[in-house]
Image: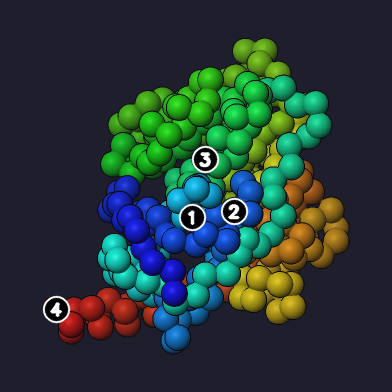
Amino acid sequence: MYRIVRKKVLNPTVTLMEVEAPFIAKKVQPGQFIIFRVDEFGERVPLTVADSDPEKGTITLIFQIVGASTMKLNALQEGESILDLVGPLGVATEIPEGAKRVCVIGGGVGCAIAYPQAKKCFADGLTVDVIAGFRNKDIVILEDEFRAHSHELIVCTDDGSYGQKGFVTNALQERIDAGIQYDCVIAIGPTPMMKFVCQVTKPYGIKTIVSLNPIMVDGTGMCGGCRVTVGGQVKYACVDGPDFDGHEVDFDELMRRSGIFREREADCRMMMQARQKEGE
């Protein structure tokens, strides 16, 4: 059992939880993830670790409430426990040797995954620019945290309600056009966003790392559910990734496979909502 020591609502659909997991906290590196089960009837769900505190023995998880399992997780309160928490899983992010300036790009809740990357690069002495994109002002998260671990932060909103109006790709292109030279771009967020970031960086030969979160079940590469095509070869995101060279990823295939269970997920979410209403 893994006790929840802190819970914070970041916006109406995104929640932060700090969880006691001392062994994971000592070993986890930026880019790695855990798999949790809320209870004995729950499904296995992957979440990238947003932060860790080895001294306190805690890890921080930030998740979006999108389906039945995350609704169950969000229903837990401080002092309650998660049944299973396995990790750290996956390969830690590797910044190209000799890199001096990086741009970390986060989209929506993907900013929770991008944050530890920015924090690590900043701590290692790299020049770090962060571009964080959201649909509107109401769902902006981790602004203060990014500002504390970057040399420049650009917040973008689709509707212009906060920060710079437009997409993260617009902000990135503007910086490249202004002559800023990046040794590496790390893009984490919705699959279409990562695809279009890669389209911006490819003509300039800028190394671009993306973090993929396809359908995962066991987290060991045995089930094959998280397979992706990278450079024409089949890879398994849970053991070969989740980070990959964005210029090599078949994003169209990834988007098709990620939507396979969309209708089933919607049905489970509706069932969960109905049960919660019955319990009120």
Is there a contact, CB below 8 Å, between mark 4 and mark 2? no
Q: Is residue 97 above or below residue 229?
A: above
Q: How many marks?
A: 4
Please identify the residue farthest to the top as the structure is shown.
Answer: 179
Residue 171 lies left or right of residue 108; in this view the side is right
Is there a contact, CB below 8 Å, between mark 1 and mark 2? yes
Q: Earlier in the sequence, mark 4 or mark 1?
A: 1
Distance from label 2 to label 3 (Cα)?
A: 18 Å
Query: Which residue is disc 1 drawn over?
Result: 57
Residue at image point 32% right, 48% down: 10
Residue 209 in picture, x, y percent from top left: 70, 42
Q: Which mark is residue 115?
A: 3
Distance from label 3 to label 1 (Cα)?
A: 19 Å
Q: Earlier in the sequence, mark 1 or mark 2?
A: 2
Distance from label 4 to label 2 (Cα)?
A: 40 Å
The amino acid at mark 4 is: Glu
Please identify the residue farthest to the front as the structure is shown.
Answer: 55
- Residue 197 is at least partly visible in this image: no
Residue 264 in picture, x, y percent from top left: 46, 79
Residue 175 in picture, x, y percent from top left: 60, 19
Is there a contact, CB below 8 Å, between mark 2 and mark 3? no
Query: Which residue is disc 2 drawn over?
Result: 26
Along the viewing direction, whichever of 205 and 26 lies nearer the viewer:
26
Q: Which mark is residue 280?
A: 4
Along the viewing direction, whichever of 160 and 60 lies nearer the viewer:
60
Residue at disc 2, secondary structure: helix
Residue at disc 1, secondary structure: loop
- Residue 216 is at least partly visible in this image: yes
Q: Is residue 243 above or below residue 213?
A: above
